[in-house]
Amino acid sequence: MRVSAKTGMLCVLTAIGLVAAGSANSSDSLPEGVTAVKAAPPSKDHPLEELFSGWHFRAPETQSLQQDDFENPGFLWVEQGEALWNTVDGSAGKSCASCHNDAAESMKGVGAAMPKWDAKLKRPMTMEQRVNNCRTENMGAKEWKWESNQMLSMTAFVRNQSRGMPVNVQADGPMQSWAEKGKELYYSRVGQLDMSCANCHEANYGKFIRADFLSQGQSNGFPTYRLKWQKLGSLHRRFKGCMANIRATPFKRGSDEFVALEIYLAQRGKGLQVETPAVRN
């Protein structure tokens, strides 16, 4: 019997107790700082009828790790990020706090709007690229590697200041061409398995595959702690993993291709709340 993606999703949500109204949106069952894990599509021509955070598709044991900040292992990196925020580094003798003061105020909403267009550089900047730009241009410090503990800690700390706020990445103006490029990548079949992002995360979300349930592939929880990784990881690491799974040659972290794909995913999930640091399988 053929099961549609929507029917399969409902079966999954019923099985883990999330489909009933009041359980999916009950404030005592959601991650700390988050009031909803689903949202309405931002436009009528959106390919999805409803937007669901990846938290929706996780087993109760995984969800429970994210529900409590004391249990959530991702907060080890958030705490490290807070320490780095106040650490002087580089020839200018500055820390992040030297310019931006209290992150709870200055960084509130920043993570929900990234990637963001940089008029001076005439290109969009991801959180990681913005951090390194500040380090080299303002602090006189060395860049951090994309997947280093320092970068993961700082991006998790900054994104966490927007937790509970809806994703709201610019979709028009100079960002439009980048979003269109990301959309093209999202629907392009690649690799030996001849698959696209949409094959899993649009056509088959909610179905069981490789001992896990497929999500909609939303990006609102990154950087994310994955049980598989046993540490925090960036969105671009996940991109590389997906491409490797379908036997394709991955783009590099920070490449224009992955930046464009990140922009499209953010716009695709516009309205979902930032969950950083999320916990996933």
Image (cartoon, helix red, strand yellow):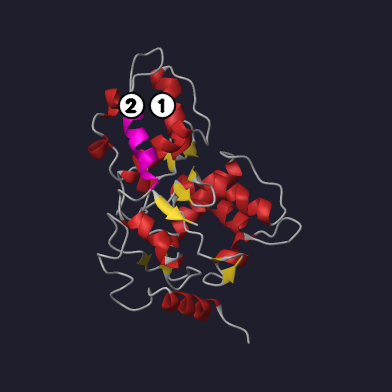
Query: Where does residue 200 sit, x and y in percent of width and height?
Result: 59, 65
**Nearer the N terminus, badge 1 or badge 2?**
2
Q: Which residues are magenta?
A: 73-84
- Relative placement, left or right, of 270 versus 231 is left
Where on the picture, by quarter, is residue 211?
bottom right
Residue found 43% across the figure and 39% down from its top:
127
Query: Where does residue 140 sit, x and y in percent of width and height?
Result: 43, 17
Give the number of the disc on residue 134.
Answer: 1
| Front one among 233 and 120 | 233
- Quarter of the image where the N terminus is located: bottom right
Mark 1 to mark 2: distance in Å?
A: 8 Å
- For label 2, the SS is helix
Residue found 36% across the figure and 60% down from its top:
64
Residue found 28% across the figure and 43% down from its top:
108
Q: Amino acid at mark 2?
A: Cys
Q: Is residue 196 above or below residue 96?
A: below
Where on the picture, by quarter, is residue 2?
bottom right
Residue found 54% across the figure and 76% down from its top:
5
Q: Amino acid at mark 1?
A: Cys
Q: Is residue 176 visible?
A: no
User: Does residue 230 belong to the magenta stretch?
Assistant: no
Q: Residues within 10 Å of mark 2 (few under 14, many from 20)?
A: many
User: Does residue 83 belong to the magenta stretch?
Assistant: yes
Residue ID for mark 2: 96
Q: Is residue 85 above or below residue 40?
A: above
Q: Is residue 241 above or below residue 82?
A: below
| Front one among 126 and 26 | 26
Query: Where does residue 185 sit, x and y in percent of width and height?
Result: 62, 54
Q: Residues within 10 Å of mark 1 (few under 14, many from 20)?
A: some
